[in-house]
């Protein structure tokens, strides 16, 4: 049972669930990007994702489990780690030896969690109500219009953009760190780290661009 | 050099400690940090006060006895040196220096700046060794060929002096770098492979049992380690642990 409860097992569990979410994020980004390039493609992809059996009843529950697991594990680890030093230092210069992002994953994670609440309120819950609770005729062209409506508000656009900045910080440490946790540290690590840092900046910035673009193209 | 020292004073493990301020004068840049504390202690003794208790032994950076969190960093602001090798020239006239013990629940304070690091000994005892028949049949270690890179990596891991700076620097008070160095130095050698499975499982189990925090890969331990023990060792220990767990 040590494999399930040890400190290394927890690290690996965080790494695997995090990598799973990183892959999901890339897929989400590609679909969102089509809203800027070609709204029709965005509509048909959204319709496919919303009505495909595999996506709805296998991938979606797996994703929700992955998100919940990553957050609960993250909070549990934070509480345990804080408990390992009951008496705090009067002087602690963390900036001298580590990045802010690496020391404050719980803060960036909590902001992302709050953002997910807003995101679910905006898109997921209305979609569930639309599909499964209220009866509407199938309309494959509604997604882009609904998306535009959400980004009409400058406050919502700003909140989304701010959350993506925190997501970038979270990924900046978390993505490369997940490989170290799984024991991957060798001559290829530098190149891999370069890719993870690029991903950590490019994907969240891309989401910010999409949010601002939609806001400005009402 | 004139300095103001803010030093953690704590009568014993049960007592509540606090930072006390001591002005000190006549400190030379060529003095080591511990020599500066010796000067302070001499003054305190002459005044009839209790001297500050701190760990020290070899005073040449190899025993791992000295510790101290100096201005928020283990072993102070210099890199790749222990407190005994830290020179006072790293500070300026008029500076205020805050000196605290290494803090972790697994390193309880004994008195003032001295902490109990026997948790490290127990991790080592859980598997940080190679069982050798010493009844006259011992094979000369040099008779076993070892890949040069593995020998170098093993030697680098073995330079860990077990001072605990990794734990002190880590925001989670994690002992992963220490344990990983001790696992790595044997895992890389043919002599160590025989007991590799139980070694890593037992040492990690002991590390967890001692109450150290979890590693979150901030890398602070590697930066603050006076011997420059690399994070590669933690990755190696993670690999060793996963493979040992799957073996049974």
Image (spheres, coloured by chain):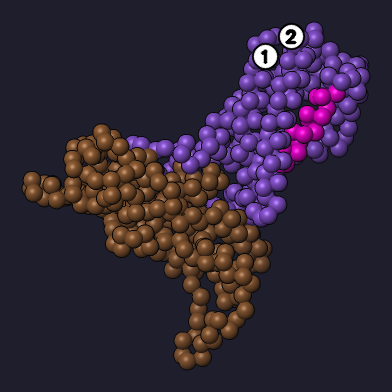
Chain colours: A purple, B brown
* Kind of element beneath mark 2: loop
Q: Is label 2 on the same chain as label 1?
A: yes
Q: Give the residue at mark 2.
A: A152
The foreground one among B210 and B42 is: B42
Query: Which of the 4 quarters of the picture holds residue A206?
Result: top right
Query: Which of the 4 quarters of the picture holds residue A155?
Result: top right
Magenta span: A15-34
| Magenta stretch secondary structure, dominant | helix
Residue A93 visible to the viewer: yes
Q: Are marks 2 and 1 in contact (CB under 8 Å)?
A: yes
The foreground one among B17 and B147 is: B147
Instruction: Point out the image quarter for the C terminus of chain A.
Output: top right
- Residue B48 in percent (x, y) is at 7, 48
* Kind of element beneath mark 1: helix
Asked if residue B51 lies left or right of residue A53, the reply is left
- Label 2, label 1: how many angstroms apart (C-alpha)? 8 Å
Q: Give the residue at mark 1.
A: A156
Which residue is drawn at the image coordinates 49% and 85% (left, top)?
A: B133
Q: Is residue A25 magenta?
A: yes
Q: Is residue A188 magenta?
A: no
The foreground one among A25 and A210 is: A210
């Amino acid at each position: 049972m040590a494999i399930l409860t040890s400190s290394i097992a927890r690290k690996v569990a965080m790494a695997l669930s995090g990598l799973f979410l990183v892959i999901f994020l890339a897929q989400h980004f590609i679909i969102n990007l089509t809203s800027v390039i070609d709204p029709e493609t965005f509509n048909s992809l959204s319709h496919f994702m919303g009505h495909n059996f595999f996506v709805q009843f296998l991938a979606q529950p797996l994703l929700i489990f992955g998100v919940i697991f990553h957050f609960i594990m993250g909070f549990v680890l934070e509480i345990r780690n804080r408990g390992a030093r009951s008496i705090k230092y009067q002087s602690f210069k963390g900036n001298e030896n580590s990045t802010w992002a690496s020391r404050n994953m719980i803060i960036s994670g909590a902001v992302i969690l709050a953002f997910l609440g807003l995101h679910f309120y905006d898109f997921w819950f209305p979609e569930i109500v639309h599909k499964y609770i209220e009866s509407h005729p199938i309309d494959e062209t509604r997604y882009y219009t609904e998306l535009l409506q959400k980004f009409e508000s400058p406050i919502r656009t700003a909140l989304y953009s701010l959350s993506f900045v925190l997501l970038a910080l979270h990924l900046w440490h978390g993505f490369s760190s997940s490989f170290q946790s799984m024991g991957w540290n060798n001559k290829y690590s530098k190149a891999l780290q370069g890719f993870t840092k690029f991903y950590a900046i490019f994907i969240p910035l891309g989401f910010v661009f999409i949010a601002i673009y939609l806001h400005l193209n009402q | 050099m004139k300095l103001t020292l803010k030093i953690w004073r704590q009568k014993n493990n049960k007592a509540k400690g606090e930072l006390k301020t001591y002005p000190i004068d006549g400190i030379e840049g060529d003095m080591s940090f511990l020599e500066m504390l010796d000067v302070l202690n001499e003054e305190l003794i002459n005044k009839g006060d209790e001297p500050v208790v701190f760990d020290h032994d070899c005073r040449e950076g190899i025993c791992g006895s000295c510790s101290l969190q100096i201005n928020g960093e283990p072993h102070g602001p210099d890199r790749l040196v222990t407190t005994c090798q830290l020179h006072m020239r790293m500070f300026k006239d008029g500076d205020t220096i805050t000196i605290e013990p290494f803090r972790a629940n697994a390193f309880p304070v004994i008195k003032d700046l001295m902490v109990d690091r026997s948790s490290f000994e127990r991790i080592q005892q859980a598997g940080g060794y190679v069982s050798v028949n010493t009844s006259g049949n011992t094979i000369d270690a040099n008779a076993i060929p070892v890949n040069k890179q593995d020998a170098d990596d093993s030697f680098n891991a073995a330079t860990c002096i077990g001072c605990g700076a990794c734990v002190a620097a880590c925001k989670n008070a994690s002992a992963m770098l220490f344990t990983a160095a001790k696992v790595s130095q044997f895992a890389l050698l043919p002599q160590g492979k025989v007991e590799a499975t139980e070694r890593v499982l037992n040492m990690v189990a002991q590390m967890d049992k001692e109450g150290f925090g979890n590693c979150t890969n901030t890398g602070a331990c590697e930066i603050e380690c006076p011997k420059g023990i690399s994070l590669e060792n933690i990755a190696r220990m993670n690999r060793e642990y996963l493979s040992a767990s799957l073996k049974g």
